[in-house]
Image (cartoon, rainbow, N blue to C red):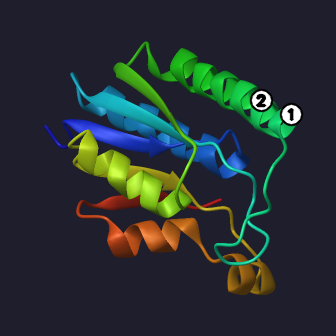
Amino acid sequence: MFCRKALLAYDGTDGANLALDKTIELCKLNAGMQVVVLHVNQPEPVAGEAYLVPSVDLLAELDTLAKRTLEQAEIRVAPYAAFTGEIVTDGSPAGAIVSCAEHHECDLIIIGNRGLSGLQKLFLGSVSKQVVQDAPVPVLVVKQ
């Protein structure tokens, strides 16, 4: 078996949906594969790791959106693999992805690449790049 358990970082974006498609392809090739789908529920950073303090209403809206996003992933993955969904609300997105993969003893991380422009990448950084650098297991970055 190529992969026993994979972590899919999923936020519902186009890049994440491509990563979800790739995850399903891997599930079809690996009978018995388990998938942990992680949604990091945070407002977008302003610059680097700096975040604005969100209001209570925004946090509630983000929580509702996160649950809906995980449900979308579950509907697509469940026919092909055992599914576990998780929402993380604190820490950096890259750190949360790596920690979740370690906690669940995943042997692969699958993540989409948003394709940030030069300035966006400079100011916001790249989550997928940080995950590749920090992950203790292989990382599949699905590019748009």
Question: For the C terminus, which image quadrant?
Answer: bottom right
Q: Which of 57 and 17 is in front in this view?
A: 57
Q: Which of 126 and 103 is in front in this view?
A: 103
Mark 2 touching mark 1, by CB under 8 A?
Answer: yes
Q: Mark 2 points at which residue?
A: 60
Q: Position of residue 2 (x, y in %)?
A: 18, 43
Horizontal side, residue 81 vs residue 116: left or right: left
Marks counted in the figure total 2
Label 1 neighbour load within 10 Å: few <14, some 14-19, many 20+: few
* Figure check: 120 above or below 103: below
The residue drawn where x is 43% and y is 66% is: 131
- Work out which quarter of the rendered image holds the N terminus and state it: top left
Q: What element carries label 1?
A: helix
Q: Mark 1 points at which residue?
A: 57
Dot 1 amino acid type:
Asp
Q: Looking at the picture, which amino acid does disc 2 mark?
A: Ala
Give the crowd class for mark 2: few <14, some 14-19, many >=20 residues within 10 Å.
few
At 46% from the left and 34% from the top, the residue drawn is: 37
- Which numbered marker is on residue 27? none
